Amino acid sequence: MNRGIRIIRLVILVVSCVALFSCKMSTGQLAEEVQKNIVETWSENGITLRVTKDLLLVKKSNTEYSGLMTVSAFGETEQLTVNVIYDGESFSWKIEGF
């Protein structure tokens, strides 16, 4: 086989692998998306949240994350515990106690 064709195939393989594995969000990116979704969801329900400390997630298992974020609403500041399930494509979140 021609050396040039081998190199092209190798480049395509490497790019495909990088694209495949880079589709999954990092823990930091996931935290940003979840935080944004929490604020939007509460806003849709008439509650204005001001995030005073960004969501910080820790991976508990292959698909489970847990984290804390601090928000201010109705003149009070609360620290929220957020549990997240992320399968690599979509996520769901739940705030403990709500």
Image (cartoon, grey):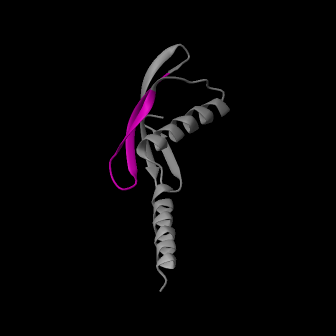
Predominant secondary structure, magenta span: strand
Image point (48%, 42%), residue name: 29
Image point (51%, 72%), residue name: 8
Q: Position of residue 82 (x, y in %)?
A: 43, 37
Q: Position of residue 21 (x, y in %)?
A: 45, 60
State yes or no: residue 5 in magenta. Answer: no
Q: Position of residue 37 (x, y in %)?
A: 57, 38
* Magenta stretch bounds: 54-71
How many callouts does the rendering have?
0
| Residue nearest the viewer, comparing 15 with 89 | 15
- Relative to 31, say whether 63 is above or below: below
State yes or no: residue 58 in magenta. Answer: yes
Q: Position of residue 87 (x, y in %)?
A: 46, 57
| Residue nearest the viewer, comparing 61 with 47 | 61
Image point (52%, 35%), residue name: 35
| Residue nearest the viewer, comparing 9 with 86 | 9
- Relative to 61, say whether 67 is above or below: above
Farthest front residue in view: 3
Farthest bottom residue in view: 1
Image point (51%, 56%), residue name: 23
- Relative to 17, say whether 91 is above or below: above
Side of 49 relative to 45 (left or right): left
